[in-house]
Amino acid sequence: MVMRENLFGFQGNQRSPYLKITVTDPKHINRLRTSIESGGANFKGLWKGADGGILTFDNIQYILRFMIDTKVCIIGLSGEEHADIEQISGMSWVEAPPTKYHMVPARDRQSNCQIEAHVHYLDLIAHQNDGEWAKIAPLRILSFDIECAGRKGIFPEANQDPVIQIANVVTRYGESKPFVRNVFCLDTCSLIVNTQILEFDAEEKMLMAWRDFLEKVDPDVIIGYNIANFDFPYLLDRAKHLKCSKFPYWTRIKNIISQARDTNFSSKQMGNRDTKATNTNGRIQLDLLQLVQRDHQLRSYTLNSVSATFLKEQKEDVHHTMITELFNGTPDSRRRLAVYCLKDAYLPQRLMDKLMCLVNYTEMARVTGVPFNYLLARGQQVKFISQLFRKAREKDLVIPNLRNEASDEQYEGATVIEPTRGYYDVPVATLDFASLYPSIIQAHNLCYTTLLNKTSVEKLNLKKDVDYIVTPNGDMFCTTTKRKGLLSQILEELLGARKRAKKELAIETDPFKKAVLNGRQLALKVSANSVYGITGATVGKLPCLAIASSTTSYGRQMIEKTKSEVEARFNIANGYSHDAQVIYGDTDSVMVKFGPKDLAEAMKLGEEAAEYVSSKFIKPIKLEFEKVYFPYLLINKKRYAGLYWTNPDKYDKMDSKGIETVRRDNCRLVQTVIETVLRKILIDQDLQGAQE
C-alpha cells in the first residue's frame, strides 16, 4: 500500500492510498492488468462499483520501467556520493564500481561480448551527461552492402539469385578513417588499393565467413542503406535456402537467432510504412534510408541522389543491369563490381558523419531517456511518455492507464489571419512567437495535474482568477499559487537546458563537442515542441483535449491581439510615417507591412514592435523579430515567396512556402518554370519579363 496522487486532474494536493503489485516476471504484467481492469480480480468486492472496470496505473514498457525505476547514486565531481538520484537514460554512461561486480568465467558465458560480468542493479552508478561524461563512447560502426546476381529485368529473389559480394567498412566513432575495409567475393577478384579481398569458391562458405567476421569485429552499430528492408532479410533468406543453419546468429546473446519480421510503422509525420525489422540484440541498427526519409524532405531517396545532395559525390558508375554480366566476366570485371560495392558501403558511413545522425540521435536518447532503438522504430509519443513518467516518479504521481478509444472529437486548431494577397515592393517584417505552444502551457499553467472541473472547484472552494483561470474555450486550470503544473516543470527544464547548450555551443571550439551540443539543443527543441502534440493526439497514451484546445485558443487570441496592438500603435496618428498593416498571420507569426521603403528602417520598426507586443503578454511568452521579406509575393494562405533578409546589406536566400518549387508532387518542368518566374519577380524585380 503506497500513498500516491493521480496525475489526471487537480486533487487539492491530497494523496490517496494505492495498491502496488509486484510480479516475478514482466511477462505476467499484462495478463494481470487485464484481469484487474475487467473486474476479474475483485477479491471479496475490494473495489466497489467495479462494473465499469477498475482503473490501473503506470502502464509502461518493461525496459522503460527498469530505466526509470533504477534510481542510481550519482558521484559528484568531488567523488562523494550525493543524495541527487539520477535515472538511467538511453546512450548514457553507467559505471559498475570495482568492488561490486564479478567476472563470469568463460564456460558460463551467455553472450559474445568481450567482457561479461554480474552486478546488482542497485550498485550501478549513472552519470549525468555533462563534462567528462558528455562524450560519446568510441563505438565500433560496421557499414555494409551486398550485391546479388539477378536475372534480367527481375528484382533479385533469395531462393534463386546468389549473393556474390559483401563489402564492409568498420570505423570507430570519432575517427575519420575506417580501420577495416574488405570485400567478401564469390570467385576470384583483382586487388583493390588499401582493401582486403577475400575470395570464396562457394556461396555457403562466403556467407559463413561473413558471419564469423561479424562476430569477430563485434560492432556496436550496424549501418547501411536500405539494410532493414533489403540486405538483412535477403541474407537471412538466402542462408536459409542454402541450409546454412549456423548463419543467423548475429546478436550478442549466444542462443538468440536474428529473424526478419514484418512490422508496420505509422505516425502522423511519416504516414503508414510497411517495413521489416531484424533483431540484432546488443547491436544498434541505423538504416540511413529510413533516417533520411524521416528527417529530410527530398524529391528522390536513392543512395545516388541523397549522396549528391549532401556529399556532392555519387556512386560508382555501374548500372544494376550490368552486375550479373560483370560477375560472370574476368577477375578485373569483378574488381570493378567490388569497387562499386565498397563505395556503396562507404557512402552510408560518410552520410552518417555528414548528417551527424549518430550524435543527434544519441543526444535525443539522453534528453528523453529512451533507448536508442526506440527513436527510429517508434513515433514522437514514447519520448514524451518517458519524460513524463520520470517527472511523475519524482513527485509521487501515478499515471492512469486510459482506455485507448480513438475519438473523433475535434478541436479548433491555430488561427490564420486572412491574407491581403498581392505583390509587395516594400519590406514586410515577420514577427514570430518563440516556442509558442510551450510558452502558452507555461504562462497559463496548463497541465494534467492542474485541470479542474465544476465539482472540484466547488469542493475545494476555489476563487476564480485567484486560484484558477478559465481559458478562452471554457476549460479550468488552477494557478501556480495552488500547484505548479508538471508540464511547465518539464518544459522549464527542457528550455533551460537548451539555453545552456546554446551558450556552451557559442564558446566551444572542439568540433566533436560542438556537434554533441548542437545535437542536444535540437533534441531539446523538438522535445519541447512535442509536449503540446501529445495532449492533442486522440490516439495516444494520454490525450487531454482540454489542454490542447486551450493552448490553440490562447494562440488564436494572441495572434489577433498582436494584429490589433501593432495596427493601433504604428500609425500616422502616433507620429509614424505610415499606417502599419498586418497582411497575413499564421500559427505563430504575423507579417507586417510598416510602410517605409528602407530595409534598415523596417527592421528597426520590427524590433520595436516585437518588444512592445511582448510587454503586453505574460512571461515567458515572447514575440521576436526575425526577418524581413522584400519584395514579397503573397499568393494565398500558406503559399508565399520572397527574398529573405536578416541584415540590410545582402539578402540571405529566396524563400518560398507551399509553391511548386518546394512541393514534391509535380514534375521538374513546373519547378523550373516557377523558379525562373520567381527569380525574375523577386531578384531582378522585372515584372514585365516574368509575365512574358
Image: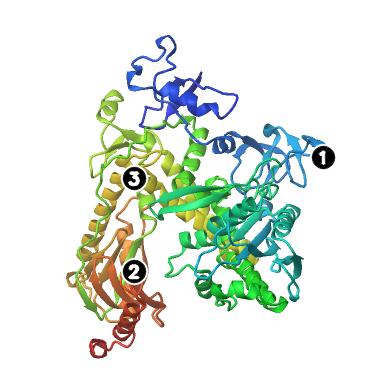
Query: In the drawing, does residue 176 fall left or right of residue 261?
Result: right
Mark 1, residue position = 106
Give coordinates of residue 399: x percent, y percent. Answer: 44, 32
Vertical order, 603 against 57 (above or below): below
Give coordinates of residue 489: x percent, y percent. Answer: 45, 42
Of residue 356 and residue 135, the one placed in the foreground of this image is: 356
**Quadrant in which residue 66 is drawn:** top right
**Quadrant in which residue 191 is drawn:** bottom right
Disc 1 marks which amino acid?
Answer: Ala
Mark 3, residue position = 536
Q: What residue sits 59% from the left and 39% below the top?
A: 87
Of residue 300 and residue 330, the one placed in the foreground of this image is: 330
Q: CA distance from mark 3 to mark 2?
A: 29 Å
Q: What residue sits 51% from the left and 64% below the top?
A: 155
Disc 2 marks which amino acid?
Answer: Asp
Q: Earlier in the sequence, mark 1 or mark 3?
A: 1
**Residue 427 in view (yes/no):** yes
Badge 3: how crowded within 10 Å, few (<14), some, or many (20+)?
many
SS label for mark 2: loop
Give coordinates of residue 378: x percent, y percent. Answer: 48, 48
Q: Could you say which disc has been placed on residue 569 in the image?
A: none
Q: Do callouts 2 and 1 mark residues in contact (Cβ within 8 Å)?
A: no
Mark 2, residue position = 665
Disc 3 marks which amino acid?
Answer: Gly
Query: In the drawing, does residue 275 fall left or right of residue 363?
Result: left
Q: Quadrant of the C terminus?
A: bottom left
Of residue 44 and residue 456, the one placed in the foreground of this image is: 44
Q: Earlier in the sequence, mark 3 or mark 2?
A: 3
Q: Residue furthest top?
A: 44
**Residue 105 in view (yes/no):** no
SS label for mark 1: helix
> Which is more foreground, mark 3 or mark 2?
2
